[in-house]
Amino acid sequence: MLLAEVAATSDAVAATRSRLAKRAAIADLLRRTAAGAEGAPGPDAADVAADVEIVVAYLAGSLRQRRTGLGWAALRALPPPSAEATLTVRAVDAAFAEMAELEGPGSAQARATAATALFGAATEREQSFLRGLVAGELRQGALDSVVVDAVAEAAGVPADAVRRAVMMRGATGPVASAALLADDPGAALASFTLEVGRPVRPMLAQSAPDIAAAFEKLGASPGAAELCVDVKLDGIRIQAHKHGDDVLVVTRSLDDITERVPEIVSVVRALPSDRLVLDGEALAVGADGVPRPFQETAARSATHETAEAELASRLELTPFFFDVLHSGGRDLVDAPLRERLAVLDEVAAPHTVRRLVTSDVEAAGEFFAGALREGQEGVVVKTLDAPYAAGRRGAGWVKVKPRQTLDLVVLAVERGSGRRQGWLSNIHLGARDPEGGFVMLGKTFKGMTDETLRWQTERFRELEVSDDGWVVTVRPEQVVEIAFDGLQRSTRYPGGLALRFARVLRYRDDKSAAEADTIETVRTLAG
């Protein structure tokens, strides 16, 4: 499959706001990709499968390599474009894979040379497309959910079957190649089941401003249906897999952190069941039992170098589990929460999240207040009859925090003045637009300690795209949790809304920009 065809489809997808039209364009390209290279005699099945997986990743706006080491500086001055489109997606993927593996003395120059060769072989349109992939700024409005629906359309199978397979596999590419290339797509999708040792996409929670609203959102009449109220810990989301003595620990984004958390491995290894998949949180707890600041906990799972590395080496994380997906050979994903909690108490005590089962809104409110007094983040209210809705914000979980917060993406940062001279200070905040890009909602420099300023100055220089002497534009990759007192109508920002009294709570290295809150969520909060 030629890269030019993918770039052309990206253009078609970007040119329409219709989800159906986006899906149809992507489905058409996937069918052509699955058919193999046009005119090629009997293309190898493994090569076609690789093409499908690469195309799926590119149309979802990402490279298959998590990190290529290719900085924005290398993309500022591109070589002259090729006049002819000859690059295949497999060749491009191989080039980025080679760059990702380079390390040690001379690696920067070798990477720059490889990048020059790659971009020099690309046409002008292909160069633009590749630059968008590398920078994470491919604004075409094709999120992973649209691509999943397009896979279903191209394979002629129900979208729910594809979604479930993606949840279980933890990635869209392998599911797409299976669905599109199998003689029986339905059977191929059904083969993706929960497997101990292979991470699944975690279930996420919706939000509510208070306990009463959470009960209402879950359709619980006061005093009628019992709900589970979990303490929401201010830690990092973890998923732990145990098969005998083998233990795997991954983050919310399915990054493997097993080697960095030996204390969690020891806890999981000592649990009674020989086969387990657990969902939970891990956090650093002080000698007084009070959670340490989130940034200290997050340092243990950071994927880039930070000034907190020395601190991280001295921290010990404690795991607290709130769900179980598998135990002793039995899959529990489709079992109701009530049943899963009974199993969790058998296999994971005393390493479980504290919870209250009640139908009383006032009792739940008192439990919520108690969690806050302990220094916790809030609570998650859950329906006891709901299955584990892996990979999406299921209707059965609703989180409640004591303040309004949003996970936004930093779009730019301004130079500091006065006491903050020499640091990058005031950050520009954007909500994710499902159609592509980000919508700016305001700026803030509040809530930043000197340590935060030092960290973000280093971090945003790594992400720098341009610098006009005052504002440093950055690649939209860093997620930050922002507390605010409300929203107001604004003609200054394109979304028509601005945050009131926004302040930084913490930077979220456990979330990608694709997981940031959307502008629709913000508009819902505005009423």
Image (cartoon, grey):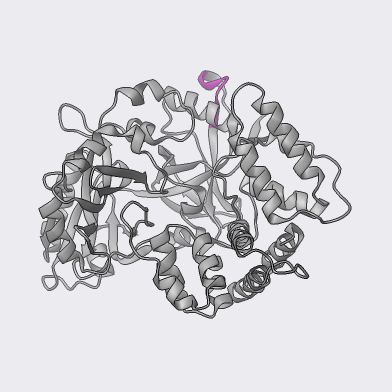
**Residue 526's image quarter?**
bottom left
Tell which of 189 and 63 is nearer to you.
Answer: 189
**Residue 110's image quarter?**
top right
Q: Which residues are magenta?
A: 419-425
Tell which of 499 and 193 is nearer to you.
Answer: 193
Image location (x, y in percent) of residue 35:
67, 72
What's the residue at 28%, 43% (across, down)?
246
Location of the N terminus by quadrant is bottom right
What's the residue at 44%, 68% (across, down)?
163
Is 71 placed above or below 208 here? above
Residue 424 among those drawn in magenta: yes
**Residue 314's image quarter?**
top left
Is 445 placed above or below 47 here? above
Is 152 placed above or below 207 here? below
Location of the C terminus by quadrant is bottom left
Residue 43 among those drawn in magenta: no
Q: Can residue 527 be seen at all in this image of the molecule?
A: no
Image location (x, y in percent) of residue 461:
60, 29
Image location (x, y in percent) of residue 391:
39, 61
Q: For the image shown, how many numbered marks are present on the structure?
A: 0
Side (left or right) of 231 relative to 27: left
Side (left or right) of 491 relative to 216: right
Side (left or right) of 286 relative to 65: left
What's the residue at 71%, 27% (across, down)?
109
Is 432 placed above or below 180 here? above
